[in-house]
Amino acid sequence: MNPWAEDFPILNEKMNGKRLAYLDNAATVQRPVPVLRAVDEFYRTENANPHRGLYELSVKATERYENARHTVKEFIGADKDCEVIFTRNASESLNLVAYSYGLNFLHEGDEIVLPVSEHHSNLVPWQMVAQAKGVKLVYLYPDKEGRLTDDEMEKITPKAKILALAHVSNVLGSVYPVRKIADKAHSVGAVVVVDCAQSIPHFKVNVKDLGADFMAFSGHKMMAPMGIGVLYGREELLNKMPPFLRGGEMIEYVHEQSATFAPLPQKFEAGTQNVGGAVGLEAAIHYLQKVGYDKIAETEQALLNYTLDGLAEVPHITVYGGTKNRRDRCGVISFNVDGVHPHDVASILDADGVAIRAGHHCAQPLMDYLGVNATCRASLYFYNTREDIDQFLSSLKRVRGWLGLGT
Ligand SMILES: Cc1ncc(COP(=O)(O)O)c(C=O)c1O
């Protein structure tokens, strides 16, 4: 019995008749009962369209929504509530920056610098800006241990107008030294866009400490419902940017031929918002704080070491990213089994109740750089146990034999 199963009943589910070992937390984590209850309670007792009605229920819904914004603001260390824009997910947040900032403030000859390990969400939008504006994409390449060396950072020159990088790579698990790179980017006048989708579920993120001008994350990777995300932006930057999506609620006044726009944050929140999601996100933040990042880090680091040590004992395995350097990495472990397609590995493990991800992980340029088409990925969260890892390792040991290959 998983010690967290009371809060996360799904962990008690059986898969293919076996105990579930859920190791796909980098894709999405599970939601605890307090988050489910908060969303349920909102829809049962407080649901109305916020910012629209003058009646009490709508005022209540508005309060819940704006309280959630305030909780996020405190959680990430922003200066003001209006610097927190609710979106659907990290992808939408990053698109907002690319469309609204990138297309309007970058010019031919400028450069956008980004690690080759970026998730497509923090890469494809920048390709769009590069193609539309004649801007060059300059890539930083991590070393074998998944680190970005000082030499790579030399590529950040005064031509750089955007530095876009993930705090944690969703394939290598590397924790990039965001502050150091952001300082370098700021010294040449670039704007720093940090994708915290894979970091904020695991450790404290403070936008000031990171040196982020923009910061994006998704609720569903930190126990909130799917469909709610956040973009943080410095007020000065957000103020000068045009709206991303247009329509209801984001206007000040609309004439037949033109419109003026609402102040922040409404300027970037067109249409009816995901208030239930925002309420769930607030509950998830409270839950995270109750568990505590110290405990999360301690549990995950111990499990990471246990997993990497266990993998080192399994023949025919290649692990990508840091194996010696375990301090600057998180519990996202990409690997391959010699001679076996990652999809086959994932299917065989699934039959044993082990849920891992297999594929390119929305990081195809990184796959090319690593010289593979795909990898398997096991990713941890604090509710995982050694039993999960033992189940994973013992299933993995059977993979090659199952396919008639030497073990
Ligand atoms: C590092 C990183 N950035 C962005 C995303 C995109 O998140 P979403 O699909 O919630 O928009 C992911 C999702 O896996 C991710 O791992």
Image: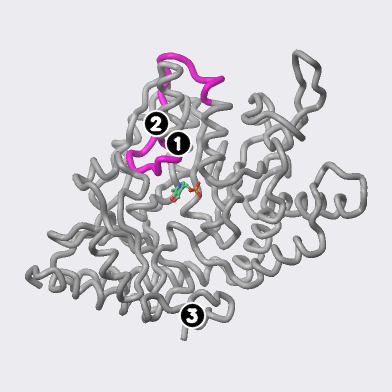
* Residue 120 x %, y %: 40, 40
Q: Residues within 10 Å of mark 3 (few under 14, many from 20)?
A: some
| Mark 3 CB within 8 Å of ligand 1 | no
Q: Amino acid at mark 3?
A: Asn
* Residues drawn in magenta: 102-123
Q: Which image quarter holds the C terminus?
A: bottom left
Residue extending furthest toward the right: 55
Residue extending furthest toward the front: 16
Mark toward the start of the polypeptide (1 vs 2): 2
Mark toward the start of the polypeptide (3 vs 1): 3
* Residue 248 x %, y %: 75, 33
Q: In percent of the image, x 23 and y 71: which residue is there? A: 396
C-alpha gap between disc 2 and disc 3: 44 Å
- Mark 2 vs mark 3, foreground winner is 3
Q: Which mark is residue 113?
A: 2
Drawn side of residue 4 relative to residue 335, left or right: right
Q: In percent of the image, x 54 and y 48: which residue is there? A: 217
Q: Which mark is residue 164?
A: 1
Q: Which residue is mark 3?
A: 12
The image quarter in which residue 47 lies: bottom right
| Mark 1 CB within 8 Å of ligand 1 | no
Q: Nearer the viewer, residue 404 or 196?
A: 404
Q: Residues within 10 Å of mark 2 (few under 14, many from 20)?
A: many
- Mark 3 vs mark 1, foreground winner is 3
The image quarter in which residue 255 lies: top right
Q: In percent of the image, x 92 and y 49: which residue is there? A: 55
